[in-house]
Amino acid sequence: MKRNMICVSAAALFLLTCGCSEPSYDGFSAPEQSKSTLEPVSSLATGNRYEDIAPTAEPTQAEFTSADGLCVIRKKESYFDVTLDLTKGDHTAAGAAYAEAIQKAMPDYEAFADDYLNELIKLSFDPYDENDTPKMIAERIDALRAALPEEYRAELDGFASGFHGGKTGLKQDGKLSRYEADLLHFVPDVLRNYACSTITADGSRTASGKRISARILEWDLGRGNKMCTAHSVLHLNNGDRSLISVSTLGTLDVVTGVNDNGVMAADLDVGTSEEFTCENKIAYSFAMREALEQYSTAREAGEYLTAHTPQYTYSHNVFLTDAKDAFVAENCVAPTGKAILRDEQTPLANGLTWNAKGCVCAVNAYAAEVNPEGMTVSPHDITRWKKYERMFGTDEKLTVSRFKDLLTSEPVDSFTENIRSEGVVFLLIADYETGTLQCAFTGTEGIIDTPDFLDLGSFV
């Protein structure tokens, strides 16, 4: 009551002092306002619809073959289609044939790879010391190389022998030394990855009744998006150990691959607090290749990878699917975590939910309850996780076209935390109904709202 009396008195005093005259705005100028950053809801969706848009099979523009016939590179408009036939020669010869064919297909390859690697090194090590940093990287390469299976070392020997930079050196000189040639295959294990995400839907969630899996690879694209000039699809023909690796021209490890049994594997970096060491360590990117070459199911490949977790240099996830199953190998190297093969039924960390039935997702963080260094402490990762949950947490029966709609539904210039960042290298989809791969490669113009998907052919 007392407060009301005060308000009435104040109002009366205001009227008396104003004389009840009409307010005047003569001579008033509104102060200049900054432009609003608010966006209408409609601008936060591309509205992409791929239902009536078939993937394009790009024609071959030119073909290049090594003298011994072990390597054939078909240059497409958007990527290099490479066949490396390990049944026609030994592993050293195969590596040398790959280097030979690359320099025919991309004459400036040495300068491109040398420049890009040195750019990555400087981004990965801040501060960069001209003396100590190259020495440290060389030590890491030596340790991981020595731990490789003999056949992989032979391939690297052959590959490095085809370039002109000598045995040593990590410097920007337009040539590839042996160390730089080796580093091409060890980037995830020595320099780390960037940001990635994956999603799969099993037959209960798809219109075909068959699995659909997708992988978005994100990395630093380099100045002028130079990495996008060397996309490759490598067909490693090794009899019943054959696989396809979608990566960058010249790499013999696997960061995204699928074997002829339909086992798909894709790695995702996870930042944890362990101190880096190469002592008694192995390259997990080559462990992924070995898993795809040795095993015919996602479970077998995942169990192999998690069994070797203590030997990896960095913590990471490996997304694994086949026609029947889907897993995420949470390979936690940190002493506070564990290696676990996570599936849809695995208990999640406190505060984390997943309500997209029939789907398994992975981002750059751990989700399992047993791994405390999880995504609940990472705004970027939890945002992408929740977006995937919302996109795929409906009752609709999904198609490959619908996957494309959802995964490209956010405009690239939005202010929100998108599942596709400006560092997207490619978006790959495996359709288990047809046994085929489709891919949207980022071009030198950078990521766009509505990318074209290419037909990469069969993986079975």
Image: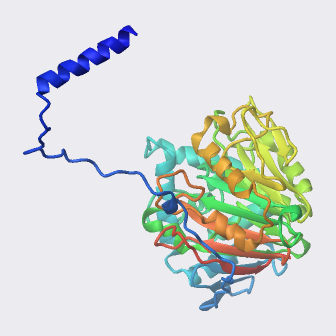
In this picture, residue 276 sits left or right of residue 323: left
In this picture, residue 393 sits left or right of residue 32: right
Q: Quick one: which residue is furthest to the left in this view? A: 27
In this picture, residue 436 sits left or right of residue 80: right
Percent across and percent down for residue 169 are: 51, 56
Q: In the rendered image of this protein, does residue 125 appear above or below residue 406?
A: above
Residue name at image x 14 percent, y 38 percent: 23
In depth, the one of 233 and 83 nearer the eye is 233
Percent across and percent down for residue 182 are: 63, 60
Residue name at image x 20 percent, y 47 percent: 32
Residue name at image x 81 percent, y 61 percent: 201
Is there any visible trace of residue 341 in the rendered image? yes
Give the colouring mode of the picture. rainbow
Percent across and percent down for residue 86 are: 81, 76
Is there any visible trace of residue 170 in the rendered image? no
In depth, the one of 192 and 170 nearer the eye is 192
Can you say which quadrant of the picture contains the C terminus? bottom right
Percent across and percent down for residue 101 are: 63, 81
In depth, the one of 60 and 96 nearer the eye is 60
- Total tally of numbered discs in the picture: 0
Res. 25 image quadrant: top left
Res. 8 image quadrant: top left
Q: In the rendered image of this protein, does residue 16 appear above or below residue 223?
A: above
